[in-house]
Image (cartoon, rainbow, N blue to C red):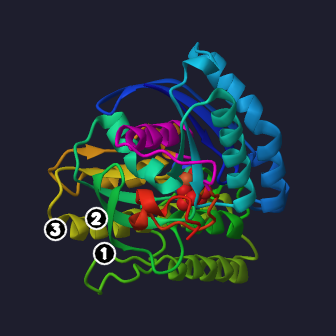
Amino acid sequence: LTILGIESSCDDTAAAVLRGTGGDVAILSNVVSSQTDLHAAFGGVVPEIAARAHAETVDLVVEEAIAAAGVSLRDLDAIAVTAGPGLIGGVLSGVMAAKGLALGLGKPLIGVNHLAGHALTPRLTDGLAFPYLLLLVSGGHCQFLRVEGPEAFVRLGGTIDDAPGEAFDKVARLLGLPQPGGPSVEKAARDGDAARFKLPRPLMDRPGCDLSFSGLKTAVLRVRDGLVETNGGLTEQDRADICASFQATVASVLAEKSRRALALGEVTAFAVAGGVAANQTLRLALETVTDLPFAAPPLALCTDNAAMIAYAGLLAFEGGRVDGMDLVARPRWPLDTTAAPMIGSGK
Ligand code: ATP
Ligand code: FE
């Protein structure tokens, strides 16, 4: 099978070509066009700007992915596209482009849940067998999932407020570091003392594997304001120490909750995915929580990309699922309701 994947749910326009079958898949190309520069001046992703950029870029990115894979459009067996969740204007751009291609080429169309793409990535990269425990940590999500099959996910717990990626982004903003915040906080933390500031570890005293990150962000705000009040501002060292303390706290909370999620049993491996999984401190902390096989995808496959969408589409297609031209773009789409009949229903 040769499959094209298209992703446009946030601020990256991406296309990828994969070839193979479920157990053995090669990434022939994986092109990502980032909009980071477009949004830099606004301190966050501006939906209208994102939507326009996706619409302008998606055809070019697809062309580039096809060329880089050394295939032609006629070689494709199917077209997979992110149908949600995400910024609706962007998702629509991808879905329209995919429909145009599917219709024009007479190829099957498969709508993919963006989160399923993240969740299945460790299987693509490390060949994990089902069921595995997945910690999905991204810009908009934070949850423990038991991944039982290509379209079977059971949510075991997750954040009750912010996602960790959001917290990284807010901490960067509080400290005047560039967006996206994750990479800048990680970079600043390299020269920092993680023990300098004691930050709260929310929900630690509560059983289960739910998480909370909004209090942590407020605690960082207080530390910053305290330093500004006493010293009139922040030094580079202060910034580094705050970043290191924040990052270590996030890693230790996620590691402890992972232990609890693993204690629920029924899984044969543990994996982390989503943009925040790019964080090295977090990867190191998670590696030690279990004797089960542990997988953390390469950085380029942790953040948004279309290879994961093509892969999720390929598995769904192999399972016999195809969508029609009535496939809709969905701003919200909880992962544990992912099932064939839901697709296109708009609910
Ligand atoms: P979602 O997948 O939930 O819809 P998204 O697509 O915006 O959200 P991803 O691309 O998966 O999210 O991840 C982006 C997030 O990952 C951003 O919040 C970013 O700050 C964070 N991130 C990226 N690299 C790192 C890093 N090295 N350390 C921590 N966080 C990081
Ligand atoms: Fe994502």
Residues at marks 1 and 2 touching, judged by CB atoms closer than 8 Å: yes
Q: Residues within 10 Å of mark 2 (few under 14, many from 20)?
A: many
Q: Which residues are magenta?
A: 303-327
Quarter residue 123 falls in: top left
Quarter residue 128 falls in: top left
Residue positioned 51% across, 78% down in the render: 216
In the rendered view, tell whether residue 204 sits above or below residue 84.
below
Horizontal and vertical percent position of residue 192: 52, 57
Label 1 belongs to which residue? Answer: 209
Label 2 belongs to which residue? Answer: 258
Position of residue 256 in the picture relative to residue 174 (left or right): left
| Residue type (three-letter) at the residue carrying disc 2 | Ser
Position of residue 95 in the picture relative to residue 271 (left or right): right
Residue positioned 46% across, 77% down in the render: 199
Label 3 belongs to which residue? Answer: 263
Horizontal and vertical percent position of residue 197: 48, 73
Horizontal and vertical percent position of residue 219: 55, 81
Q: Nearer the viewer, residue 80 or 158?
A: 80
Real-space CA distance between mark 1 and mark 2, rounded to the nearest whole angstrom: 7 Å
